[in-house]
Image (cartoon, helix red, strand yellow):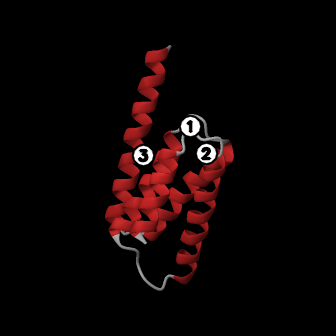
Amino acid sequence: MLSLLSTLEHSLKSRKKHALHATSVTNVCVGLLSGLKAILTLRSQQLEMEILNAVQGIFQSILVEGSISESQRRASSDGLGLLARLGNDMFTVRLAYSQSVQLEQTTSDEEKSL
């Protein structure tokens, strides 16, 4: 599972200048979202922290891209929400903290550009 997530993350990073990058981002979002929804439905076992962190990293890297569409941004945000439901309390707190730090940095960068 971790090797698959690593491959997805590498693919997203290496294809940023590729013509099919938007399609790759959409496919990654769809695949990860459907997998997370299935896991949430089954609730057969809890995901390891490494897997949660890897998926979080993928969704966050998609969100910081400037060229993504609204639907890709929404799918990534939905994915982070599902991760918060799947993870334990500590993971959810760390996820919320990292999102707030990222939001502060983005806001700060936008203010500097004005």
Label 3 neighbour load within 10 Å: few <14, some 14-19, many 20+: some
Distance between mark 2 and mark 3 Cα atoms: 24 Å
Find residue 36 and report its horizontal and vertical position in percent.
54, 69
Q: Nearer the viewer, residue 32 or 94?
A: 32
Find residue 68 and report its horizontal and vertical position in percent.
61, 40
Q: Nearer the viewer, residue 65 or 36?
A: 65
Residue found 31% across the figure and 63% down from its top? 90
Image depth: mark 3 or mark 1 in front: 1
Q: Does 31 appear above or below 100?
A: below
Q: Nearer the viewer, residue 107 or 53?
A: 53
Q: Which residue is mark 2?
A: 21
Secondary structure of residue under mark 2? helix
Secondary structure of residue under mark 3? helix
What's under tag 2, amino acid-wise?
A: His
Look at the image and tell me in which quarter the N terminus lies: bottom left
Residue 99 badge? 3
| Contact between labelled residues 1 and 2, with CB atoms less than 8 Å apart | yes
From this viewpoint, which residue is outermost toward the top? 114
Q: Is residue 80 left or right of residue 31?
A: left
Label 1 neighbour load within 10 Å: few <14, some 14-19, many 20+: few
Q: Which residue is mark 1?
A: 17
Q: Earlier in the sequence, mark 2 or mark 3?
A: 2
Q: Does 85 appear above or below 66?
A: below
